[in-house]
C-alpha cells in the first residue's frame, strides 16, 4: 500500500487521556425538554432525583451549563487500564471496497466487558461508593452492561445484584460466568426475590422475562434495601457525559493525524456510544467551527425509534416507574420481534440525541439485520475484529457511505464507532451464517398500537 503516512492504529499516550468530560448540552442552542414527574406533570429538579441517583450523578444529570467536568483522578486511574483506545484506519476494508474514502473507527472492545459500557460503569460505581452507598442493583439483557458494572463494582468494592432477563440468563451462560468472576449476584428475572417478580410469575410461571421485568425487579430491590441504588447504562445525560471520553480521544487522535471527519456514524440503542463519539465534533458544528459535518445514527429496522418513532414524553422503562423524558420513542411497552438478534432493543432514545435529531443536526437510518450481519462478516474478514451485532449497524452504513464515494469519486473521511466485540453473539452469527436469520419490520398498525399507550400529561401532551 502506497503513501502510508497514517498508521493502521493510532494510540494516544497515557498522558493524553482526557482529564475532563465534555458536556455537549453547554453548547446546544436549545436544550432537551426537562424530565417530568409522571404524577404531577411538573419538571423534575435535581433534589427530586436524589431518591434514584446518588447526588453527584443527579447533579450531572441536570447540569446543562458546565461545559467541561473534571474526571476524578481515581477514575482516570481505572480508565488507564484500558484507555486510550485505538483509532484504527481501515486500510484493508477500504481496499476491499475499492473506495477512495478514508475510513476510521474508534474501537471500544478492548476490555473484558467487550464494549464501551465500562466508560460509564466506572464513574457510576465510583460516585456511589464515594457517597457511602453499600450496594447497587441493575438489570441486564444481553449482558454487556451487567458485565461492565460487575467489573466496576468489584474494583470499588461495592456488592452488586444483577437482574438478568431469564431467557438471556439461560441462552448466554458464559455472560453469567464473567459476571460471577467479578462476584456479582446474578438473578434470572422474573424471580421470586421481589414483589414485582412474584406477581409476574403468579400470572405466568413460564415467563422468560424482558428488560421491563428486570428493571422493575432491580428498582424494587434498590428502593427496599438500605444504602442501595439502581443504576442505568445508557440513555441518561450523565451516561452520555461519561462516554464523551470516546469522542475526545478520537478528536485528539485525528488532530494529531491532521484529519477531520466529513461523516461521523454510530449505532444507536439508547444512544450512549453515539452520543459520546460525536460530542466534540457536534460541539464544533453547534458553535459554527465546522458547520458541515454530517452525523448518522444507525438503528435496527425492527426497533426504529428515531426513524419511525414519535417525539413525545414517555416512560424510560416498561414498568412505568421512571420519570417522563421527551424523546423519540416507540412506546414504553414496545418489545422488538423475537426474530431480532442484533441488539439495540430499547424503545426510546437519549433525550440529547432526540433533540439534536429533531432540530436537524443528526440524520438517522434504519437497517435490516441480514444486511448488518453481511457487513459484520466482511468487516471481520478484513479488519481482524469480530464486531458486536450492535456495532455492525454502524459498519453497515460506513460501508454504504464508502460505496457512495466510490460512485462519485469523492475521498470523504468517514469515522465510525466500533462499540464492541461480538464473541457472546455466536447464536446470532450462526443464524446468519446458516441462512435462518429473518428480517422483521413492524407494521404501521403495530407501532400505532404502541403509540396509543403513550402517557397523557395535562397541558403538555394529550
Ligand atoms: C449496549 C451496546 C450498544 C447500545 O447502547 P448505546 O447506549 O446506544 O450505545 C451498542 N454497542 C454495544 C457493543 C453495546 O454493548
Image (spheres, helix red, strand yellow):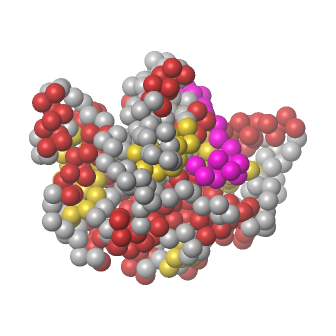
The residue sitting at 40% across, 45% down in the picture is 315
Q: Nearer the viewer, residue 256 or 456?
A: 456
The x, y position of residue 282, in whole percent, is 68, 60
Position of residue 243 in the picture relative to residue 229 (left or right)? right
Q: Is residue 373 visible?
A: no
Would residue 431 be found to the left or right of residue 131 on screen?
Answer: right
Examine the structure image and report whether residue 390 is included in the region drawn in magenta. no
- Which image quadrant is residue 208 in? top left
Question: Residues in magenta?
Answer: 354-376
Residues 398 and 223: in front is 223
Q: Is residue 358 magenta?
A: yes
Q: Quadrant of residue 111?
A: bottom left
Residue 92 horizontal/vertical position (percent): 68, 45
Q: What residue lies at 22% left-to-right and 46% top-to-bottom?
A: 217
Q: Is residue 32 above or below residue 297?
A: below
Give x and y (percent) for residue 447: 50, 26
- Tell me which residue sits at (65%, 47%) in the image: 358
Q: Residue at x 28, y 58 (%)?
A: 230
The outermost residue toward the right is: 409
Q: Position of residue 61 (x, y in %)?
A: 45, 65
Amino acid at each position: 500500500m502506497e503513501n502510508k503516512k497514517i498508521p493502521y492504529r493510532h494510540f494516544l499516550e497515557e498522558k493524553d487521556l482526557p482529564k475532563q468530560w465534555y458536556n455537549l448540552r453547554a453548547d446546544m442552542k436549545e436544550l432537551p425538554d426537562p424530565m417530568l414527574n409522571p404524577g404531577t406533570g411538573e419538571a423534575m429538579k435535581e433534589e427530586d432525583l436524589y431518591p434514584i441517583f446518588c447526588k453527584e450523578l443527579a447533579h450531572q444529570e441536570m447540569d446543562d451549563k458546565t461545559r467541561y467536568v473534571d474526571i476524578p483522578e481515581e477514575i482516570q486511574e481505572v480508565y488507564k487500564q484500558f484507555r486510550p483506545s485505538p483509532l484504527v484506519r481501515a486500510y484493508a476494508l477500504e481496499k476491499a471496497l475499492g473506495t477512495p474514502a478514508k475510513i476510521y473507527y474508534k474501537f471500544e472492545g478492548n476490555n473484558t466487558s467487550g464494549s464501551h459500557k465500562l466508560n460509564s460503569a466506572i464513574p457510576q460505581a465510583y460516585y456511589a461508593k464515594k457517597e457511602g452507598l453499600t450496594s447497587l442493583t441493575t438489570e441486564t439483557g444481553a449482558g454487556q452492561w451487567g458485565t461492565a458494572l460487575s467489573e466496576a463494582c468489584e474494583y470499588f468494592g461495592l456488592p452488586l445484584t444483577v437482574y438478568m432477563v431469564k431467557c438471556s440468563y439461560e441462552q448466554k451462560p458464559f455472560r453469567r460466568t464473567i459476571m460471577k468472576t467479578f462476584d456479582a449476584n446474578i438473578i434470572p428475572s422474573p424471580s421470586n426475590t421481589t414483589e414485582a417478580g412474584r406477581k409476574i410469575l403468579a400470572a405466568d410461571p413460564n415467563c422468560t422475562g424482558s428488560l421491563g421485568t428486570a428493571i422493575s425487579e432491580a428498582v424494587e430491590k434498590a428502593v427496599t434495601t438500605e444504602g442501595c441504588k439502581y443504576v442505568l447504562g445508557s440513555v441518561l445525560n450523565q451516561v452520555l457525559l461519561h462516554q464523551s471520553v470516546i469522542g475526545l480521544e478520537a478528536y485528539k487522535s485525528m488532530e494529531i493525524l491532521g484529519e477531520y471527519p466529513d461523516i461521523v456514524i454510530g449505532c444507536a440503542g439508547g444512544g450512549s456510544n453515539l452520543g459520546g463519539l460525536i460530542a466534540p465534533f457536534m460541539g464544533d458544528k453547534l458553535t459554527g467551527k465546522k458547520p458541515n459535518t454530517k452525523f448518522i445514527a444507525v438503528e435496527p429496522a425492527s426497533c426504529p425509534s428515531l426513524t419511525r418513532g414519535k417525539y413525545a414524553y414517555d416512560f424510560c422503562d416498561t414498568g412505568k416507574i421512571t420519570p417522563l423524558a421527551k424523546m423519540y420513542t416507540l412506546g414504553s411497552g414496545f418489545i422488538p420481534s423475537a426474530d431480532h438478534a442484533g441488539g439495540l432493543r430499547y424503545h426510546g432514545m437519549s433525550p440529547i440525541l432526540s433533540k439534536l435529531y429533531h432540530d436537524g443536526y443528526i440524520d438517522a437510518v434504519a437497517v435490516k439485520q441480514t444486511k448488518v450481519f453481511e457487513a459484520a462478516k466482511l468487516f471481520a474478514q478484513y479488519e481482524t475484529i469480530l464486531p458486536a451485532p450492535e456495532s455492525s449497524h454502524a459498519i453497515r452504513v460506513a460501508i454504504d457511505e464508502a460505496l457512495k464515494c466510490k460512485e462519485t469519486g469523492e475521498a470523504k473521511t468517514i469515522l465510525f464507532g466500533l462499540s464492541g466485540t461480538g464473541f457472546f453473539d455466536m447464536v446470532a452469527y450462526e443464524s446468519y451464517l446458516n441462512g435462518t436469520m429473518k428480517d422483521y419490520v413492524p407494521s404501521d398498525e403495530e407501532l400505532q398500537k404502541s403509540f396509543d399507550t403513550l402517557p397523557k400529561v395535562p397541558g403538555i401532551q394529550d
